[in-house]
Amino acid sequence: MKVLGESYEHDRIKIAGNFIYPGYVVMGDAGSAMIDCGLNILGPQYLASLRTLMGDEENLEFLFLTHSHYDHLGAAPYLRRNIRGLKIGGHEKIEALLAKESVRNRMASLSEIQRAFFPDVGGDDVSFAPLSLDLKFSGGERISPAGVHCEVYSAPGHTADSLAYFFPEIGALFPGESIGVPEGRDGAGVQVEFLSSYDDYLKTIEKLASLQPTIICMAHAWIFTDDDAKLFFDNSIRATGTYKKMIEAALDETHGEVDKTIELIARREYDEKGTIFQERNAYVMNLAAQVRLIAGR
Ligand SMILES: [Fe+2]
């Protein structure tokens, strides 16, 4: 089954905030853990959802981050300020990254572009701030938030600090963008996301496929289950190879000029197809990283 997060029903998996930038909440008997917390401007929405889901936001024990992109950890500083006792876990590299003012400013400006799409977010202080991690992961950790077992996997390729969280008792995988993201109105396509390493990205897809999750809570919008979850890995591997060939062909067309290649692909893939719902600046930034990787091979 492929279902948009807003229509998904599961007694242990809930969505806080907005299903496009979901904060996935795994409800345990003794508390709960949230995976990712998208845009900083959506901080108040995550908090409101948590109050609805669990009565008191302080029942959220853990926040786990999949990677260091602004649309996955954006509200972490806000949630830290607003939820007493919240323990935040993520890749050990995230602390050093968010300690840099230039990185925080860049994340803040990318988030502000999104404000037009979310006019009702209110005036709370959602500013980025340095973030100290209570749990520093590098992959291989086993933890039991709220009495539910969780395995942490290193999942590089999208970013070097990507992590995936797998809850074997529920069969649920939270891969962030480490395996790509469903694309198009029916989620049948795959948006390819190798920003830090093409080879690592493919290895990560294969490694996470071997876990055989029955539920994949995608980074944005979609939840795939059962046969569709299984198929997604194959489709993603195929799409990754196709995407690399497309970049190579475009580099040939522009005689290896990277900036022209980025413009060419953005026009064809984003503007003309119109199937990518990511904000355009963020799309072009990711595309540029991929073109540079392939050009440098
Ligand atoms: Fe990302």
Image (cartoon, helix red, strand yellow):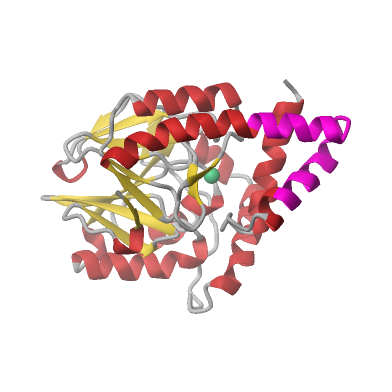
- Compare residues 224 and 79 and report the one nearer the observer: 224
Look at the picture and state if 141 lies above or below 14. above
Q: Position of residue 31 (x, y in %)?
A: 17, 52
Label count reads 0
Among all residues in the image, which is located at the extreme left?
Answer: 29
Task: Name above or below for residue 264 compared with residue 19.
Answer: above
Q: Is residue 83 visible?
A: no
Query: Which percent across, then down, holds residue 290?
Result: 67, 35
The quarter holding residue 155 reads top left
Residue 206, above or below 127: above
Image region (quadrant) for ligand 1:
top right
What kind of secondary structure does the magenta stretch mostly adopt? Answer: helix
Is 261 contained in the magenta span? yes
Q: Is residue 32 left or right of residue 129?
A: left
Residue 81 counted in the magenta span: no
- Expressed as whole percent of the image width and height from the top left, the position of residue 192 reads 56, 39
| Residue 235 appears left or right of 70 | left
Q: Which residues are magenta?
A: 244-268
Q: Position of residue 111 (x, y in %)?
A: 59, 61
Which one is nearer the viewer's eye here, 18 or 2? Answer: 2
Horizontally, residue 49 falls left or right of residue 243, namely left
Residue at 74 percent across and 29 percent down: it is 248
Residue found 51% across the figure and 25% down from its top: 202
Residue 45 visible somewhere in the drawing: yes
Residue 261 lies in quadrant? top right
Residue positioned 17% across, 41% down in the render: 148
Q: Residue at x 71, y 27 (%)?
A: 294
In the image: residue 161, left or right of residue 282: left
Q: Which quarter shows the C terminus?
A: top right
